[in-house]
Amino acid sequence: MKKVLGIILGVSLLFAAAPAYAGDFGQCAGCHGPSAGGASGPKLVGFDKAYLTGKALEIMAGTRVATTPTGKSLIPVMAGTMKRLNNNNAAEIVAGSGLDKALDFVVAQH
């Protein structure tokens, strides 16, 4: 029980370290980490906004192929989350949308 509580506390502190991303984009931080440096999902930091925008559009269009190490595709899950953050628009990134802000946050990380 102490180990479980320690893990919960550690995860809570990890997300508290980057409140803007984890708070506003917690569904992203869950896999990509609180600073977008990667966790169970790939790291997003280190790429420019044009590259990340292109990948986001591919995901929302269903044309990006990516699988977990076990072979499971998370594209449908990510596509749905991205569309919701993007005001239900899959054709372009809506300026000022949650997805646009998430991309800006990731690019600002070093």
Image (cartoon, rainbow, N blue to C red):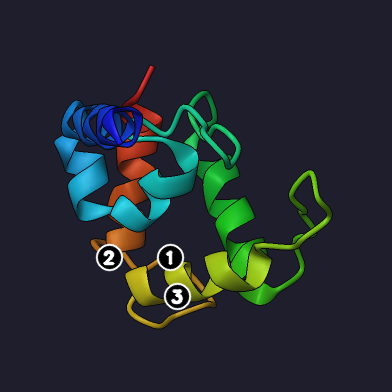
Question: Which residue type does callout 3 highlight?
Answer: Lys
In the figure, residue 95 lies in which quadrant? bottom left
Q: Nearer the viewer, mark 1 or mark 3?
A: 3
- Residue 108: % across, % down: 32, 28
Residue at 20 percent of width and 53 percent of height? 24
Q: How many marks?
A: 3
CA–CA distance in space, label 1 to label 2 = 8 Å
The answer to whether residue 69 is above or below residue 14 is below
Query: Label for residue 97?
Result: 2
In the figure, residue 47 lies in which quadrant? top right
Residue at 76 percent of width and 54 percent of height? 66
Mark 1 in CB contact with mark 3 (< 8 angstroms): no
Residue at 36 percent of width and 59 percent of height? 99
Question: Which residue type does callout 1 highlight?
Answer: Ile
Q: What residue did someone put label 3 on?
A: 83
Neighbourhood count class around disc 1 (C-alpha, 10 Å): few under 14, some 14–19, many 20 upward: many
- Residue 3: % across, % down: 34, 28
Q: What residue did someone put label 1 on?
A: 93
